[in-house]
Image (cartoon, helix red, strand yellow):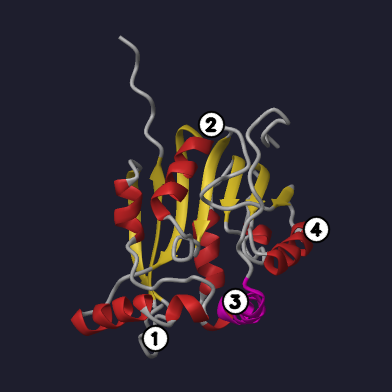
Amino acid sequence: MRLMSAGSAKVAPSPVHHPLFARFYARCSVDAERRLGLAAVRERLLAGLSGRVIEIGAGNGLNFARYPAAVAEVVAVEPEPLLRRLALDAAQRAQVPVDVVPGAAEALPVKSEAYDAAVLSLVLCSVRDVARALAEVRRVLRPGGEVRFLEHGRGGGRMMTMTQRTLDRTVWPVLFGGCHVAREPVAELRGAGFELGPYRRLLLPEQGPKLPTSYGVLGVAWRPREPEPR
């Protein structure tokens, strides 16, 4: 694992602490694996990965059991203490080496260009500074490294998007651990300089009522390779 050396800049302890939401999320996320079909979506998210991987905002570690054997190691960054403890338990059961570490997406505690792939799984909705977090993803990926993303965000018709924006300005982030429902992950990745690969829009669940959190996207992006020196 290529963590920062002792001589590197130190990262301040994360201020993220949502104990009530963390307990709620830990219970509901497990149920959503079956009820919303997220288990199959996570399989598609991680299929074909290899080498060194950094997972940002690992939550309670539901991805860990689905990493392919070709993955040499996973460094899983999770700022919320309760979720990090659950992720540590999940790491013990994983078939690939997983090291769970504290840290915030906006200041990843790892060296630059150290990873072959980064996994963003339902995390961009809740980071405090999306642009800074994605700049950190670019920093820690090697040139040509890929980003696998599964996110939710703005979607639906005019009334739904108005509802999402209203929720983001009022109660939703307060009640749900900083989550926002009206962000646009594809546009944010493109704006951060990533090359977008194939992606598909999802409804979670595919059948049933459409909620502000139902509009997802699953895809891949790459850190551009540096131009050849002239």
Q: Look at mark 4 in the image and give the residue it sits on.
A: 92
| Residue 122: image location, x then y, percent | 49, 65
Rate crowding at label 4 as few (under 14), some (14 to 19) or many (20 or more) other CA atoms within 10 Å: some
Q: Earlier in the sequence, mark 3 or mark 1?
A: 3
Residue bearing the label numbered 2: 113
Q: Which residues are magenta?
A: 18-33
Q: Residues at badges 3 and 1 in contact (C-beta under 8 Å)?
A: no
In the rendered image of this protein, does residue 43 appear above or below residue 215? Answer: above
At label 2, which amino acid type do we have? Glu
Write down the residue under mark 3. Answer: 29
- What residue is rendered at 38% in x and 25% in y? 226
What label sits on residue 96 in the rendered view?
none
The residue to which callout 1 is attached is: 207
- Mark 1 touches mark 4? (CB < 8 Å): no
Crowding at label 3, few (<14), some or many (≥20) Cα neighbours within 10 Å? some
Distance between mark 3 and mark 4 Cα atoms: 19 Å
